[in-house]
Amino acid sequence: MTLDYLAFSPNHRGGFRDKDSVGVFAIFHPVFHNPNRKIMNLHGKRDLRMNGYPPAVLTGLLLGISFPTYPSLRLELLFWIAFVPLLLELRRQPGFRQVFLHAYTAMLMFCAVSLWWIGLATMGGGLLTVLAHAFFMCVPFMAFHLLRTLKSWRFALYCLPFVWVGWEWLYIQQDLSFAWLVLGNSQALMTHMIQY
């Protein structure tokens, strides 16, 4: 029998809080061993939260369809909740590699859904555009992870909009930039809301 190390503390609902919560302790107990590696709560029931890459894919889909690539859909308001699944998943990811893979998956899906039309001109160019710009769009999430590691989850979350806007400004200054991917473009068809 093996023992699993869980760096979480039980909360009042029988689940687990994350490592940033108060009262973190390590549990070395055979009751918590799960050979199938399914996430379980203290009562032995399966936790039904989305785990793994589906939240990243969902974020990419929500971001992609909120862009005016599909003007007949008018789903711009989805942009305002699109990052929630990815951020909830990143909260459970401890390492740089996991954060990068989840962020790259989300941004790859976002670029594929919003930039599909480039492939109509040239398939190779469209594929390279999607792959390269998905990588560029991961930079704010890597800065987010660094802030989370240095300070806290909450601090990194408050800083994320500023980090993102700063990164978009730097991104637009380079020669490989593609202004279509600036997040504000998702609201371009909502002229009544974006007047300033």
Image (cartoon, rainbow, N blue to C red):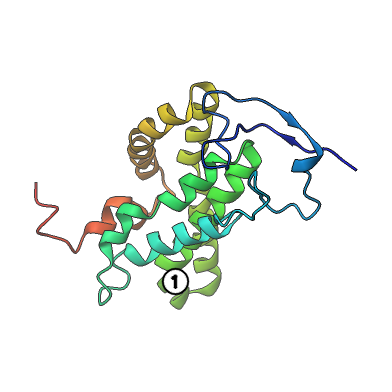
Mark 1 neighbour class, 10 Å CA radius: few under 14, some 14 to 19, many 20 or more: some
Would residue 14 be visible to someone looking at this image? yes
Q: Percent x, y for residue 168?
A: 36, 42
- Give the structural element (helix, strand or loop) at label 1: helix
Q: Residue furthest right?
A: 1
Query: 10 or 49, which is in the foreground?
Result: 10
Does 161 appear above or below 62? above
Does 17 appear above or below 24? below
Query: 47 or 106, which is in the foreground?
Result: 47
Query: 64 or 156, which is in the foreground?
Result: 156
Q: Percent x, y for residue 87?
A: 47, 45
Q: Amino acid at mark 1?
A: Trp
Residue 133 lies left or right of residue 160; in this view the side is right
Quadrant of the image containing the N terminus: top right
Q: Percent x, y for residue 31?
A: 77, 42
Q: Quadrant of residue 160?
A: top left
Would residue 179 be visible to someone looking at this image? no
At a point 52% along the width and 24% down the height, the residue shown is: 22
Q: Percent x, y for residue 38?
A: 70, 54
Residue at image mark 1: 116
